[in-house]
């Protein structure tokens, strides 16, 4: 915990405007989209559900009202690590806050409760399971406390339709009913209409205002690559991001351990994280990542929710996620500070079957299949990925309307649309094979027949005797999957919803009958692929020509003084954070560091104009910062 906290008492901020608190306490000169509207709702006592993307600034929407209110704000948060980081960040800005959870020793717990009862604390963090305990209930009902606001973070957890349902969240409503005068603010990064309705109903929100921010994260470059030699691809990417912090998501614990070991042996700063590790190891590894003691975390989906680390510069998906909701949540952990970051997905059709294998454990197989298909459609897209991703969440976006600085929004837009190529012969082979199989099999089986597979089921069915058996060896398996995807997209073939069985549409039958030429925007990348000269020119490089991703790219190589200040500040920030036992970003984030290096302020007054430096931080750190600048 940072020392020398500048206490803001219950009455000191009463009557202050949100803009004043934003600038003087947090060092920001303007609100992000929806922040002001949410804060005004909360301050006026109106229940509010806000859906804001990760990195959209959700925390400020309850922290600023908490400083304006003359009472206590209770924040329900699911993760202990997040509570600790939030309290540390608040302390660095001079705000009294505590968390009450199982990580505290009894004496420390009693000390925190005493601080709450003294009236100094503005915000108290509790877990959903802890909220209903007798200890917390006794505290909240103390006659000296006035509960002004209940904030529910990760509110999607209260819905059984949410991607991370937690039964403990269902008890929140009963506690909230005990404080009818307190305003309720529910926050989450993603929520479908069904989930939003669940949140409102389960929390018994009164005439709530439901606010949805844009899902667009323009600072995150979206990239999808066919998975070939995946380890070589990963290493190639990491070598271009040697000083950056990032997360690599894998499908299984075994993959996490194997990849982490390989990368560690090759000299990368990396640790694993998954549910198979004991609690102490998981906590130790997570803390090392949050505090920049290790650069890369290789993890399963068990890692990430509530990680308040703003300088994650990349998120890599080593395997296909199960849904676009999961994908969006995970890539949202990159670039929370608004600086350039990258989301890379390595896509293989084999991942689809790996995911489907676990559908038997799903309560709703059809729903799981629909979610997976949306993810596959995104991964195999041939037009702007950002447009496709945002459309899934009901948001309209056109690449042409984006600003110049965000023009390269994805790999497809940055390299140009793929030109259409003559694929008449492969298409005829594929459609004919579906017919020969009596339209009774899925994509994988059709491709296996085309490639001349001698699998037992193919031999037992006698399909090795078909005229289409083995006629497709000029293309690789990945190429055939690529072709199947675009044929589905162009309505030449269709898949049954229940078993994904392929059938030829009327449009496809007409094509076979007329034998007319077919031109499609596809680039074959497997062995034996025949590329026309035009398509070869448009072939995507192994990684798109996207050079963004470094938080410090704004500092020109010709600005020697700026580079010196930047490096010296990074070193000082790390030492100061270690001494205070907090993550470096609690001192200040990369965006603040870059702005100091660029503007080179010479006085405390000039430091107050820097992004992210409020009164408390300038009083505490100005001497050290100015000394580095003037050195």
Image (spheres, rainbow, N blue to C red):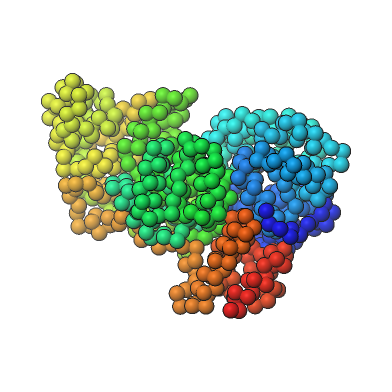
Q: Quadrant of residue 104?
A: top right
Q: Position of residue 292 (x, y in %)?
A: 52, 56
Up-down: is 444 above or below 380? Answer: above
Q: Position of residue 314 (x, y in %)?
A: 45, 54
> Could one spot residue 297 in this view of the protein?
yes
Name the residue at 48% across, 38% down.
Answer: 277
Side (left or right) of 274 relative to 494: right
As rendered, which of 100 and 167 lies closer to the eye? Answer: 100
Q: How many marks?
A: 0
Name the residue at 46% across, 29% down.
Answer: 367
Q: Position of residue 224 (x, y in %)?
A: 37, 49
As rendered, which of 106 and 274 lies closer to the eye? Answer: 106
Q: Quadrant of residue 24?
A: bottom right
Up-down: is 54 above or below 178? Answer: below
As rendered, which of 82 and 453 lies closer to the eye? Answer: 82
Q: Considering the image in quadrants, where does the C terminus appear?
A: bottom right
Q: Check the image and name the residue furthest to the right.
A: 143
> Could one spot residue 403 in this view of the protein?
no
Q: Check the image and name the residue furthest to the top.
A: 460
Name the residue at 70% across, 73% down.
Answer: 604
Name the residue at 46% across, 78% down.
Answer: 558
Side (left or right) of 101 relative to 500: right
As rendered, which of 520 and 155 lies closer to the eye? Answer: 155
Up-down: is 14 above or below 160? Answer: below
Q: Position of residue 204 (x, y in %)?
A: 71, 32
Side (left or right) of 621 relative to 309: right
């Amino acid at each position: 915990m940072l020392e020398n906290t500048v206490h803001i008492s219950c009455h000191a901020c009463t009557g202050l405007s949100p803009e004043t608190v934003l600038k003087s306490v947090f060092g920001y000169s303007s609100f992000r989209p929806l922040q002001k509207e949410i804060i005004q709702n909360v301050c006026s006592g109106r229940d509010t559900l806000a859906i804001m993307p990760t990195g959209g600034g959700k925390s400020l929407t309850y922290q600023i009202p908490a400083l304006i209110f003359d009472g206590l704000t209770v924040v329900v948060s699911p993760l202990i690590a997040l509570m600790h980081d939030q309290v540390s960040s608040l302390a660095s800005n001079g705000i009294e806050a505590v968390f009450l959870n199982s990580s505290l020793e009894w004496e420390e717990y009693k000390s925190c409760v005493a601080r709450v009862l003294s009236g100094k604390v503005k915000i108290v963090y509790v877990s959903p399971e802890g909220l209903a305990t007798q200890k917390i209930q006794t505290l909240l009902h103390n006659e000296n406390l006035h509960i002004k606001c209940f904030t529910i973070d990760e509110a999607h957890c209260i819905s059984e339709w949410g991607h991370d349902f937690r039964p403990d969240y269902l008890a929140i409503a009963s506690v909230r009913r005990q404080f009818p005068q307190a305003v309720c603010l529910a926050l989450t990064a993603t929520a479908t209409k069904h989930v939003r309705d669940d949140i409102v109903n389960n929390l018994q929100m009164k005439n709530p205002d439901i606010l949805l921010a844009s899902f667009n994260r323009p600072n995150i470059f979206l990239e999808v690559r066919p998975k070939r030699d995946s380890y070589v691809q990963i290493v190639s990417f990491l070598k271009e991001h040697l000083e950056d912090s990032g997360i690599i998501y894998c499908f299984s614990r075994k993959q996490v351990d194997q990849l982490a070991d390989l990368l560690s042996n090759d000299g990368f700063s990396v640790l694993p994280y998954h549910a198979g590790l004991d609690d102490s190891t998981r906590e130790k590894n997570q803390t090392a990542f949050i505090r920049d003691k290790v650069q890369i975390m290789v993890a399963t989906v068990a890692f990430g929710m509530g990680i308040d680390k703003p300088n994650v510069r990349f998120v890599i998906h080593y395997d296909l996620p199960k849904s676009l909701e999961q994908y969006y949540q995970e890539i949202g952990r990159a670039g929370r500070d608004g600086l350039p970051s990258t989301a890379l997905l390595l896509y293989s059709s084999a991942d689809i079957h790996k995911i489907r294998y676990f559908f038997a454990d799903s309560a709703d197989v059809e729903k799981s299949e629909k979610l997976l298909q949306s993810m596959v459609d995104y991964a195999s897209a041939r037009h702007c990925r950002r447009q496709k991703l945002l459309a899934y969440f009901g948001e309209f976006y056109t690449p042409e309307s984006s600003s110049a600085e965000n023009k390269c929004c994805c790999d497809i837009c940055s390299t140009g649309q793929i030109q259409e190529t003559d694929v008449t012969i492969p298409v005829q082979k594929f459609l004919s094979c579906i017919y020969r199989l009596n339209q009774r099999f899925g994509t994988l089986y059709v491709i296996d027949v085309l490639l001349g597979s001698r699998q037992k089921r193919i031999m037992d069915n006698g399909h090795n005797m078909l005229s289409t058996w083995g006629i497709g060896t000029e293309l690789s398996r990945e190429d055939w999957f690529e072709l199947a995807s675009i044929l589905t997209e162009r309505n030449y073939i269709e898949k049954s919803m229940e078993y994904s069985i392929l059938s030829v549409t009327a449009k496809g039958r007409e094509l076979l009958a007329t034998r007319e030429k077919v031109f499609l925007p596809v680039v074959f990348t497997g062995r034996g692929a025949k590329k026309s000269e035009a398509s070869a020119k448009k072939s995507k490089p192994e990684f798109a020509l996207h050079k963004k991703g470094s938080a410090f790219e704004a500092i020109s190589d010709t600005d020697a003084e700026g580079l010196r200040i930047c490096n010296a500040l990074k070193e000082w920030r790390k030492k100061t954070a270690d001494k205070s036992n907090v993550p470096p970003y609690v001192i200040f984030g990369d965006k603040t560091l870059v702005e100091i290096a660029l503007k080179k302020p010479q006085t405390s007054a000039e430091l107050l104009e820097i992004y992210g430096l409020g009164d408390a931080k300038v009083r505490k750190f100005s001497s050290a910062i100015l000394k580095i600048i003037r050195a």
